Amino acid sequence: MIKRALLAAVLMLAPISVVSAQQTSDTRALAALSEKELMKLPAKTVFSAQAKPTQSLKPRAIGFYSRGCMSGGKALPVDGEAWQVIRLSRNRYWGQPQLVALVEKLAREAKEQDGWNGLLVGDLSQPRGGPMPSGHASHQVGLDADIWLTQMPKRRLDGKERENVKPTIVVKDRKSIDPDVWTTAHARLIKRAASYPEVARIFVHPPIKAELCKWAKGQGNWLAKIRPYYGHNYHFHIRLRCPADDPNCKNQPEARPKDGTGCGEELAYWLGNAPWKRIEKPPPSKKPAKPVKPPPPLTVAGLPAECRAVVTAE
């Protein structure tokens, strides 16, 4: 009876706010469950309920960017000399120490050398990584970070402002940049991020890639890391390589476009219609479509085995 009550309580947990979280009771409840019960829990419910990182496990990225977790997560300070974290209520400003160090370095160097006043930092990962209840399929192992294409203001935003700050969209549509918004400072910022050797990829909206190719005149190895992808019209997504000493972390294949930069055939594909067909709504059919049953939620059993210890550790 006690285990069933604990199971019901865990299933009902909503994401806990950064201010009021009490993580100890959550991990003890999870640890009290049987292996079978724990494996059946929706992974996004379990991991979003953790308000703090593991204290007893060393930093490790476990699994793949879109199916994994992390131990020993480190928080990016919400205020820095050249950055501010936004959307604090999400509690997604945690990452591997390497990621936190890189965001801080990028913020400082971009301010000193690129004419960028400071970073507005969006999502990194949850305290223990894992699937999020909304917003991302990746960001699960502490090696991904979203950086807004809006400069930090010259004052500290308060909590309410950080929750409601509006993003600046730098493109007109899926094919063209907005010249009234886009600046060379944007280009210098993204180039700097792509130039760090530990960065594997940077995801941007296709017109941003096109503008970077034009600005750089198609020259520079860093351009190969800039990958066009949906939904990146107001921020860019930094992805680091797996740390060399994390054997259970799975890298994404290296970005190796045919032309060495991705400014040719690959970019032309993304500026065309083909990649968008799978996300755009088709025209209404005369015959009502049969409702598609949604897939069952990913459970803890679907994550790497090491994630079970991560979610129950103190």
Image (cartoon, rainbow, N blue to C red):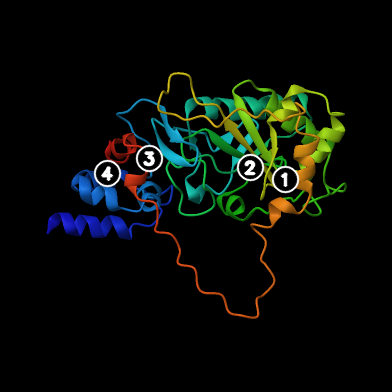
**Looking at the image, residue 220 lies above or below residue 206:** above
Q: Position of residue 121 (x, y in %)?
A: 61, 40
Q: Residue at x 72, y 48 (%)?
A: 233
Q: Which residue is mark 4?
A: 27
Of label 3 and label 4, which has the lower sequence position?
A: 4
Q: Which residue is mark 3?
A: 52
Residue situated in front as seen by the camera: 176 or 57: 176
Q: Which residue is mark 2?
A: 156
Tell me the kind of residue under disc 1. His
Q: Position of residue 23 (x, y in %)?
A: 32, 44
Q: Which residue is mark 1?
A: 205
Q: Badge 1: how crowded within 10 Å, few (<14), some, or many (20+)?
A: many
Q: Nearer the viewer, mark 2 or mark 3?
A: 3
**Looking at the image, residue 306 lies above or below residue 28:** above
> Is there a contact, CB below 8 Å, between mark 3 and mark 4?
no
Q: Nearer the viewer, mark 4 or mark 2?
A: 4
Secondary structure of residue under mark 4: helix
Q: Position of residue 309 (x, y in %)?
A: 28, 36
Q: Between marks 3 and 4, how big is the CA–CA gap? A: 10 Å
Q: Nearer the viewer, mark 1 or mark 3?
A: 1
In this view of the protein, can residue 77 be seen by the observer?
yes
